[in-house]
Image (cartoon, rainbow, N blue to C red):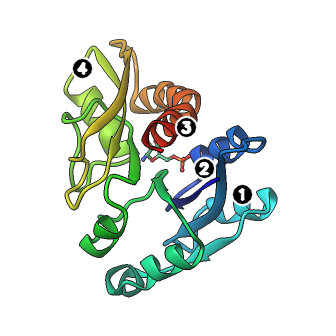
Amino acid sequence: MKNIAIFASGSGSNAERIVEYFAESEQINVKLFLCNNPEAGVIQRAERLQIPLIMFDRPAFKSGEVVKILQENQIDWVILAGFLWLVPKNVVEAFPNKIINIHPALLPKFGGKGMYGHFVHEAVVENEETESGITIHFVNECYDEGGIIFQVSFPVLKTDMPEDVARKGQVLEHTHFPEVIERTILAST
Ligand code: GRF
């Protein structure tokens, strides 16, 4: 059984989809949520889904305390599902090619520091892009720069507002993220 921990800073809709997807899995177990934002909606989702959730702050992330928690819980893979902080070196080194992130654009476009959530979709509309999409990638010490695992695009219409782009992207995230995680984990065992 491979144990995964999901890091989230926001609503947690992807985290919930992943829990649902692996609910009956014999090979992959969603063991833990970790959260860095006391206002995050994912906190309520964890309660409802009965998944243990651990809050942490920047010092704990940088000091190795979060890695210690992951190791004590026999976590094998770390999934970032709407997690906004840069992952520090001590975490990346403890889980080499075992940290997966989802970004709501076609990286390398519209990625990097500060490019998250509505900022991404506003930039896509601002740039009059005719398509956008999602990217699932391995995480290294730089924002959104790890090896790309999966991308899928969707058309952006002239009439689309940022929230339309966000909605189209989330549908694809909820459809693809869990199965891409599964394929990636099972391919590496
Ligand atoms: C998603 O759009 C994801 O691409 C980005 O943050 C958002 C998380 O949404 N990384 P949710 O918290 O999973 O609903």
Q: Between 172 and 188, which is closer to the camera in this rendering? A: 188
Say if mark 2 contacts mark 4, CB within 8 Å: no
Label 1 close to label 2 by CB (< 8 Å):
yes
Residue type, label 4: Glu
Kind of residue at disc 1: Arg
Closer to the eye: label 1 or 4: 1
The answer to whether residue 168 is above or below residue 68 is above
Q: Quadrant of residue 106?
A: top left
Q: Secondary structure at mark 2?
A: helix
Would you call the spot at circle 1 few (<14 residues within 10 Å), some (14-19), or many (20 or more)?
Answer: some
Gap between marks 1 and 2 measured at Cα:
9 Å
Residue for badge 4: 129
Question: Three-letter amino acid code at disc 3?
Answer: Glu
* Coordinates of residue 117 in the picture (x, y in percent): 40, 46
Q: Secondary structure at mark 3?
A: helix
- Is label 2's Cβ within 8 Å of ligand 1? yes
Q: Amino acid at mark 2?
A: Ala
Residue hosting label 1:
45
The numbered dot on residue 15 is 2
Name the residue tied to disc 3: 182
Front residue (pair 155, 1): 1
- The residues bearing labels 2 and 4 have C-alpha atoms spaced at a distance of 28 Å
**Mark 4 vs 3, N-terminal side:** 4
Q: Earlier in the sequence, mark 1 or mark 2?
A: 2
